[in-house]
Image: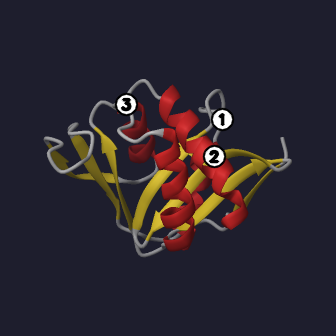
Amino acid sequence: MNTTIRRAGDGDARAVAELLIRARRAATAIPTAVHSDPEVHQWVATVVLAEREVWLLEDGGAPLAVLVLDGGWVDQLYVAPGRTGGGLGSRLIEHAKSRRPDGLQLWTFATNTGAQRFYLRHGFTVAERTDGSGNEEKAPDVRFVWAGGIIPQE
């Protein structure tokens, strides 16, 4: 596998949206999405790519994982179904750290224990737990923080 990480552009809106939709559907440890597929496509095209920093991890041009940074937040990190566990998410979270060496934070659902183990392995710590009343899914969640530090070069 010859994977590369590149910044996504406007022409990637469909690929980014489809990857988010497929990965979210395949993730049994998180609540069902509250937005329709067309709404996700619209949001990616008009908000995500316009206002956030989006990175694609690809193999031969085929998107395998996506990272969305919104300031000091990891807004989205999804790996294509069937490709989890192969280090793709690790490459993207290390990329995020190199882009935000002063620190990062993110939310994950309390039911997503696999993601929690992943972030703990990558040096994040639990900062807050909520009952979910502040998110669209109304599902309990956990805020993780990474305080920053020395990052290995990619």
Q: Residues within 10 Å of mark 1 (few under 14, many from 20)?
A: few
Residue 66 in view in this figure: yes
Residue type for callout 2: Ala
- Give x and y (percent) for residue 12: 69, 58
Question: Which circle's residue, 3 or 2, is located before the other in the chain?
Answer: 3
Location of mark 3 (residue)? 32
- Give x and y (percent) for residue 114: 42, 32
Residue type for callout 3: Thr
Quadrant of the rendered image containing residue 104: bottom left
Question: Which circle's residue, 3 or 1, is located before the other in the chain?
Answer: 3
User: Which mark is on residue 54?
Assistant: none
Q: Is residue 43 above or below residue 139?
A: below
Along the line of sight, which residue is nearer the eye, 49 or 58?
49
Residue 154 in view in this figure: no
Residue type for callout 1: Gly
Along the line of sight, which residue is nearer the eye, 25 or 42?
42
**Rounded to the nearest whole Å, what is the CA distance between mark 2 and mark 1?**
11 Å
Under circle 3, the secondary element is: loop
Q: In the figure, is residue 87 to the left or right of 125?
A: right
**Rounded to the nearest whole Å, what is the CA distance between mark 3 and mark 2?**
20 Å
User: Which mark is on residue 86?
Assistant: 1
Location of mark 2 (residue)? 65
Which corner quadrant holds the N terminus? Answer: top right
Along the line of sight, which residue is nearer the eye, 24 or 115?
24
Q: Tell me the residue at 57%/61% (across/down).
A: 45
Q: Tell me the residue at 45%/71% (across/down).
A: 149
